[in-house]
Amino acid sequence: MGGPREMVLALADDELCIGQNLAWWIAVGPFLEEDLALTSISQDELGHARALYGLLGDDIDALAYGRQPHEYRSAHLTELPCRDWGETLVRHFLYDTAETVRWAALADSSWEALGAVARRALAEERSHLRHASGLLSRLLRTEAGRSQLLPLFDQFTPLACELFELPPDCAADGLVAAGIIARPMSDQRAEWQAAVDDTLAEAGYQPQWPEHADPASAANGRTGLRSPHFAALHAEMVEVLALDPTARW
């Protein structure tokens, strides 16, 4: 699996991990509206993962749950459990801002099936982003919100940059030349950073952006090295399937 397929696998793995982590908030959200919102967003992200895996093969369960850890390509940001609601909100904002940019770059893909998935996902991601940015902006207008949330951006923005890294087998220039993606990943990342900067400027805050994803940490997600959180997340994903691996659901 290489080139465009490896890129799609990384996107699908991101969606699978983020969706699974958001599902943890079912019935434990800080208030009812957020419980319902995060549950709905979780379902959307898992649906996007399923659609992307479906582009790569017929056995979606095997792709999603049957690989060895080193065969996943998810960004480490998506593997974080984020059991604190402030952490979840900051990651939600960073991730869905990035997703809006990434899906838009795929909406007119020369891989027609991928373009169709992207267009459907983009409409949902825009709704996710409205939820994240609206809530974040309201909280950043308060002193308590700024003191609790802004330090988390210093923690999460370096990891989030990996969302615009490609797996080693992907040639970015070739993907653009073939029309698989409309814009280089560097241009997409610049658009994402500008959007994040604009939102945080309202709170008088400027995040510290690394020039590149840290090759000693974040970028390893794309190369197959999993974060310390992946094993527990994967065990949660396959808990039911592991009861009877031969069952047909």
Image (cartoon, rainbow, N blue to C red):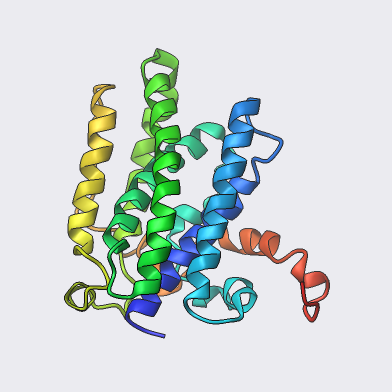
Identified at 54% across, 51% down, the residue is 44
Q: Quadrant of the N terminus?
A: bottom left
Image spot of residue 124 (x, y percent): 45, 47
Q: Quadrant of the C terminus?
A: bottom right
Occupied quadrant, residue 90: top left
Image spot of residue 192 (x, y percent): 26, 47
Relative to 110, say whether 33 is above or below: above
Identified at 55% across, 33% down, the residue is 85
Q: Is residue 189 left or right of residue 59?
A: left
Residue 52 visible? The answer is yes
Q: Is residue 59 left or right of residue 201?
A: right
Question: Which of the pair 55/86 is nearer the observer?
Answer: 55
Image spot of residue 244 (x, y percent): 82, 75
Relative to 44, say whether 203 is above or below: above
Identified at 28% across, 38% down, the residue is 196
Question: Which of the pair 118/221 is nearer the observer?
Answer: 118
Image spot of residue 59 (x, y percent): 61, 80
How many numbered circles are shown? 0
Find the residue positioned furthest to the bottom.
Answer: 1
Residue 209 visible? The answer is no
